[in-house]
């Protein structure tokens, strides 16, 4: 049994997002940020960029600065440099961007920062589209999904960009995927990231009831199902080479995950089979990477 | 650096775009957006909902997990003062409804209950002091209904006397349910325990038919409870029913030991209910070769499934679709003439009817025949005393168990028709409440009927499969020669482990999942309680969805409703 009861008492009760936050009801992204900020505590400076998180950041009780869309990783580098000049090693710098701000618009700044091994944590809360501006596709939007720019007649025809492979190719000190469906794991990964120097990347799936066309109460459940269906596996990569993959305790076919989301409701059995096939293939590839080099 | 403390410039804390009015807007009361409101409210688990005595199973299991059997007993005792008995003989409908069966298998509730009951019996049964009252109460019948009512009334201080026609106390617990399911030692201890508040039981004291109740009132009893049960076996209404060698199941079970001559003899039992199964299993223990004849098939048998299986395991044979139509004696033995049956349409009870098949019948030879096709009651005691019956022979009662005669109440089988020990206990307790209300002039307590948490309302992501702890039972081969108790019960370690399997359906155990998962941080830990900050809760329902136990309900906000 997942011992959440005992576990919950270990989570800081202090909140770093003041109530009345400008997030839609049931937002997975704000829940991810709420949990991450709890772990990071007070000694943190957040930098964020245009996204739903710009709205949440208004309620952060920790300092937060808003960067231009493409520049959040550059701003994080700069803030870190400033703190270092002040001799402050205690404060963590946290860059936060949506999938658009990470996979697409922010990727050059992020790539450059990792190449310099800038010392900050980068969180991509991935709601799989440009949500703030009205659900436009991003390169993180999954295959087959409806968005405002990939209508049902012509849903997204490309696979989700494999951001973790890009991170690994940079030989980044630490990269991990995490999920609000598994808060104990998410919190563990934030803690682990805090102990490492250099650029650290956390990829957190963050269901968006508005954009995913699903019921508002499903964000946590869908996050869990994404892991159980292996559409969004939980794993860690150390130095871009060594992998550790978590096997779901309970496995489900992708159809169960897709079925609950209106953005996939147009998919026929054949398309779902295709998604299942790709998911299985990617899962095997991930396990193969792990078997060549595991994290001890 | 000194103190490692950075004093941040104001501009960093308040970036330019965060104008005060934007902040003011951000701090708005997002609770105004809400369409649905989460309500944290404990609900009834299906186990308790199904328990005829209404035990708060979830709550006592919590104490069992903490190994606090004393507190667990206190919870059980609120509804059932004899868990050592019900833990053994109740057919445990709680387990049939237990939500856990949807995940792996139902909780072994009866074994835990038995263990708590045995614990209570081991404690000293010294007489606690109660404030004595002067109104005397008489109870007719010392079955579970009568003694439960008597226990609670004496605990309330009423001088209470039970009149029992038989030479032993306990009703069917003593003269029905066989020893191998309920050792008489346990029953004796239990009855002694129930008398610790001063309950008096007078055996060999039948309340006479005519004027029986008038006499009791004349003796100064202010209230009388009828708890007379169903004492007779129903007749087969076929020829030869009164031949020597034919004995009603109920009569046989009252004194099985007096039939030692059945050793190696053929005994035919007629019927498919619990009394038939018990009769066959008792005959087997006397060394006889029992054969049950039942009209319908295994699926329609009204007997408890576990009991029927135990009988088969022990070597009891059951012949289905056999309906006796006559009995005769031949060469000093009995012959049961049977009709071959087949299954037809479903009847009112939802079971398929047995209808005579075409073709010849058959005969079964036997040394003894035990009809066990149901019970029957002699309503004379009631009618002769001016008490109305419901037409089926049961005493007619209202929802508070009042009969048509002032000051007379009825509980247990005599009011419900033949039922179960747990129902008799629930009914006896209810009668105690009614009699207390009647004698003291207070109000009836408000009954709490909670909504039952369904399996679908549980979040299984927070539970994993764990095997059910099963107790050992006497090897079937050893049972053929002994009336020793078949079920051995669970060890204390296993009891505690099994209680750990309870999912606490509908009961908030402060796991704080709702607090953890609320995106808006709107669930607050307010001391030991959890509460929702309605100013900020947006009504997303994640808390309700992620509550493992179905404690949170989402209710519509009325302010949006069109008038
Ligand atoms: C063989 C058998 C096995 C059973 N097994 C189970 C089981 O395993 N589990 C289960 O839950 N249920 C079982 N039952 C059913 C259960 O025993 C009854 O439902 C339960 O005992 C009813 O309780 P009661 O107090 O209403 O009546 P009873 O237990 O029948 O007690 C009534 C008492 O009233 C006395 N009485 C009657 N008339 C008078 C009078 N005029 N004056 C004085 N005393 C009188 C009788 O002698 C008797 O002692 C079984 C029943 C039988 C017959
Ligand atoms: C350079 C630039 N281009 C476009 C925008 C408009 N814009 C603001 S937020 C946003 C979408 C952000 O999407 P994502 O990063 O996925 O975050 P989300 O809104 O989904 O949380 C866009 C396109 C902008 N602010 N700046
Ligand atoms: S799991 Fe526990 S609370 Fe739920 S029905 Fe079973 S015994 Fe009752
Ligand atoms: S999770 Fe939070 S915001 Fe959502 S309904 Fe529950 S208390 Fe309200
Ligand atoms: S989630 Fe846990 S703490 Fe919240 S109501 Fe349900 S049982 Fe209670
Ligand atoms: Mg996005």
Image: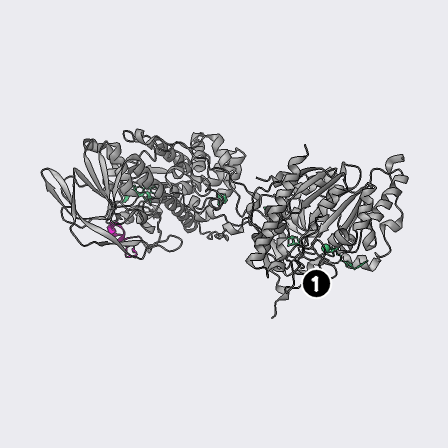
Where is residue B240? Give x, y as percent. 13, 46
Query: In the depicted view, which residue is nearer to us: B134 or B485?
Result: B485
Q: Which residues are magenta?
A: B378-394
Q: Is residue B244 left or right of residue A183?
A: left
The answer to whether residue A177 of the structure is visible from this angle is yes
Q: Quadrant of the N terminus of chain A?
A: top right
Residue nearest the viewer, comparing A78 with B379: A78
Q: Quadrant of the C terminus of chain A?
A: top right
**Identity of the residue drawn at 45% across and 39% down:** B108
Q: Secondary structure at mark 1?
A: loop
Residue A89: quarter of image: top right
Q: Horizontally, is B35 left or right of A79 in the view?
A: left
Q: Is residue A295 magenta?
A: no
For this view, does B215 lie left or right of residue B59?
A: left
Percent coordinates x, y for residue B205 in the rendering: 27, 40
- Judged by its main secondary structure, the magenta piece is loop
Mark 1 — on which chain does it sit?
A: A
Image position, residue B51 (x, y; %): 43, 46
Residue underneath mark 1:
A149
Q: Does B521 sit above or below residue B165? A: below
> How many C-alpha atoms fall within 10 Å of the one at disc 1: few (<14), some, or many (≥20)?
some
Image coordinates for residue B279, horizontal then vertical, percent: 26, 39
């Amino acid at each position: 049994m997942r011992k959440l009861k005992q576990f919950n008492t270990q989570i800081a009760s202090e909140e770093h997002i003041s109530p009345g936050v400008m997030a839609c009801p049931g937002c997975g992204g704000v829940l991810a940020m709420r949990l991450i900020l709890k772990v990071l505590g007070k000694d943190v400076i957040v930098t964020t960029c245009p996204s739903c998180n710009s709205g949440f950041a208004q309620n952060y009780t920790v300092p937060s600065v808003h960067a231009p869309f493409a520049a959040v990783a550059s701003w994080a580098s700069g803030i870190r440099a400033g703190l270092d000049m002040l001799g402050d090693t205690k404060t963590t710098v946290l860059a936060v961007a949506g999938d658009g701000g990470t996979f697409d618009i922010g990727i050059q700044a992020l790539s450059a920062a990792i190449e310099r091994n800038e010392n900050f944590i980068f969180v991509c809360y991935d709601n799989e589209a440009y949500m703030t501006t009205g659900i436009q596709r991003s390169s993180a939007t999954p295959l087959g999904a409806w968005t405002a720019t990939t209508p049902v007649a012509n849903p997204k025809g490309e696979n989700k960009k494999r951001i973790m492979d890009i991170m690994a190719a940079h030989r980044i000190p630490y990269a991990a995927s995490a999920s609000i469906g598994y808060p104990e794991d998410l919190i563990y990964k934030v803690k682990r990231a805090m102990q490492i120097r250099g650029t650290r990347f956390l990829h957190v799936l963050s269901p968006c009831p508005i954009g995913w066309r699903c019921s508002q109460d499903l964000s946590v459940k869908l996050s869990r199902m994404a892991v159980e269906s292996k559409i969004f596996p939980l794993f860690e990569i150390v130095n871009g080479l060594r992998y550790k993959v978590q096997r779901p305790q309970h496995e489900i076919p992708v159809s169960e995950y897709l079925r609950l989301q209106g953005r996939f409701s147009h998919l026929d059995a054949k398309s779902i089979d295709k998604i299942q096939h790709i998911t299985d293939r990617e899962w095997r590839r991930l396990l193969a990477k792990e078997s060549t080099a595991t994290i001890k | 650096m000194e103190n490692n403390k950075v004093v941040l410039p104001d501009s960093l804390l308040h970036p330019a775009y965060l104008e005060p009015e934007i902040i003011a807007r951000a701090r708005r009361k997002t609770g105004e957006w809400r369409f649905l409101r989460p309500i944290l409210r404990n609900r009834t688990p299906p186990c308790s909902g199904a328990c005829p005595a209404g035990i708060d199973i979830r709550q006592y299991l919590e104490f069992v997990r903490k190994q606090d059997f004393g507190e667990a007993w206190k919870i059980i005792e609120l509804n059932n003062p004899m868990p050592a008995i019900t833990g053994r003989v109740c057919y445990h409908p709680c387990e049939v409804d237990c939500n856990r069966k949807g995940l792996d298998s139902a909780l072994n509730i009866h074994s835990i209950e038995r263990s708590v009951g045995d614990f209570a019996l081991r404690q000293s049964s010294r007489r606690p002091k109660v404030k004595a009252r002067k109104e005397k109460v008489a109870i007719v019948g010392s079955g579970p209904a009568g003694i439960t009512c008597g226990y609670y009334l004496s605990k309330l201080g009423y001088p209470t006397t039970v009149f029992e026609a038989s030479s032993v106390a306990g009703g069917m617990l003593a003269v029905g349910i066989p020893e191998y399911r309920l050792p008489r030692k346990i029953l004796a201890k239990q009855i002694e325990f129930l008398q610790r508040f001063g309950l008096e039981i007078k055996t060999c004291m039948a309340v006479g038919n005519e004027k029986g109740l008038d006499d009791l009132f004349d003796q100064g009893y202010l209230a009388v409870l009828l708890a007379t049960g169903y004492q007779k076996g129903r007749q087969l209404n076929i020829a030869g029913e009164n031949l020597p060698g034919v004995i009603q199941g109920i009569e046989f079970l009252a004194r099985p030991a007096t039939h030692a001559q059945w050793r190696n003899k053929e005994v035919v039992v007629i019927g498919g209910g619990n009394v038939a199964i018990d009769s066959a299993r008792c005959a087997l223990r006397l060394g006889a070769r029992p054969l049950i004849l039942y009209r319908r098939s295994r699926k329609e048998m009204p007997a408890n499934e576990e009991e029927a299986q135990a009988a088969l395991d022990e070597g009891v044979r059951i012949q289905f679709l056999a309906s006796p139509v006559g009995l005769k004696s031949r060469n000093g033995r009995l012959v049961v003439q049977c009709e071959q049956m087949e299954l037809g349409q479903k009847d009112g009870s939802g079971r398929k009817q047995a209808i005579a098949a075409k073709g010849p019948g058959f005969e079964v030879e036997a040394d003894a025949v035990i009809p066990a096709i149901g019970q029957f009651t002699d309503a004379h005691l009631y009618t002769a005393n001016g008490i109305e019956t419901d037409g089926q022979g049961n005493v007619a009662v209202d929802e508070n168990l009042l009969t048509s005669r002032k000051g007379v109440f009825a509980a247990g089988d005599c009011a419900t028709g033949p039922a179960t020990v747990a129902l008799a206990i629930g009914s006896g307790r209810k009668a105690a409440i009614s009699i207390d209300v009647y004698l003291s002039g207070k109000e009836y307590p408000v009954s709490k009927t909670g909504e039952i948490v369904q399996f679908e309302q549980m979040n299984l992501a927070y539970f994993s499969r764990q095997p059910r702890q099963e107790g050992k039972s006497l090897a079937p081969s050893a049972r053929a020669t002994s009336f020793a108790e078949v079920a051995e019960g669970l060890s204390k370690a296993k009891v505690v482990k099994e209680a750990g399997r309870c999912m606490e359906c509908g009961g908030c155990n402060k796991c704080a999942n709702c607090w953890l998962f609320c995106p808006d941080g709107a669930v607050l830990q307010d001391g030991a309680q959890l509460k929702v900050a309605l100013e900020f809760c947006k009504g997303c329902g994640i808390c309700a969805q992620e509550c493992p136990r179905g404690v949170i309900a989402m209710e519509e906000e009325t302010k949006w409703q069109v008038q």
